[in-house]
Amino acid sequence: MFTKRILILSLLIYSLPTFSTELSEAKDAYDRNDVVAAFVLYEKLAEQGNVTAQNNIAYMYYNGIGTPQDYQKALILYEGLAKQGLVNAQNTLAAMYVQGHGVPQDYTKAVSWYKKAAEQGHAEAQFNLAFMYKKERGVPKNYQQAAYWYEKSAEQGDADAQVNIAFMYHAGQGVTQNYGQAFYWYKASAAQGNAKAQYNAGVLYYEGEGVVQDAVEAHKWFNISARNGFNRSAIQKDKIEKKMTAPEIELAQKMADEWIEGFSEYTLSGE
């Protein structure tokens, strides 16, 4: 199943200074939820060849914001922008081919556009291209290529890519098995709140693979993951408690509470 990451659409806010005033007016209208006025303003700029406005009109057509939803019109705009090399449009166009929105589903064309965006350094496209290689969608299955692109995306801080490349190092899939690298990427993803990565960090701490064995740390991460909605972690936490002392359990619980509190403050502050 495709993850929530497969279709990422966004408004663009940059452009040439020539259109800065008009774009600001359109964005202000959009921000105050006067989406019909925003659409009219963006459409006028789009007709003058402004790529930011063209992208935003495509986004609004796709989502039915300020205008009736129209995948075909969105597709035409995204296709034109993608051919000009606009990386966000390339990623979105690929996703439209994956979903079959406004165009017949075509994984081969999706891969082509994901690759163009990925080669420009687009983290989401890199993630999506890796997924296509791993799941044999529009391209022969190739774990080496999947690992390559997951790691490229992971290096840019993508939490989903980090947990995926961690798994591939853990299993030796497409890369030489390396528990140390697996732990590194699981921990990076776990630190961003990924529940599955938090669980796997706990597993490696418990098994002493890629890191010094530490039941307290394992319990902490199982606890955090369980409270993050990953049910398997609760089972593992209860299992290892039987081999821990009461002070160890208390310490692990305190560490989990402190981590969760700190993470909540961090995300709320937007830092």
Image (spheres, rainbow, N blue to C red):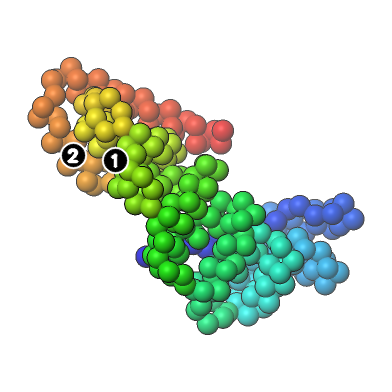
**Image point 90% across, 55% down: which residue?**
18
What's the distance in space between the residues labelled 2 and 1, CA to CA? 9 Å
Q: Residues within 10 Å of mark 2 (few under 14, many from 20)?
A: some
Query: The N terminus is located in which quarter?
Result: bottom left
Give x and y (percent) for residue 13. 73, 53
Q: Is residue 103 or residue 167 the one in the foreground?
A: 167
**Image point 23% across, 41% down: which residue?**
233
Q: Give the mark nearer the N terminus: 2 vs 1.
A: 1
Q: Give the residue at mark 2.
A: 236
Determine the secondary structure under disc 1.
helix
Are the residues at dot 2 and dot 1 in contact (C-beta closer than 8 Å)? yes
Q: Give the residue at mark 1.
A: 199
Q: In screen coordinates, is 244 left or right of 61?
A: left
**Image point 56% across, 51% down: which residue?**
123
Residue 186, picture quadrant: top left
Q: Relative to residue 242, is residue 139 depicted above or below?
A: below
Query: The C terminus is located in which quarter?
Result: top right
**Image point 24% across, 25% down: which residue?**
214
- Please identify the residue farthest to the bottom as the structure is shown: 104
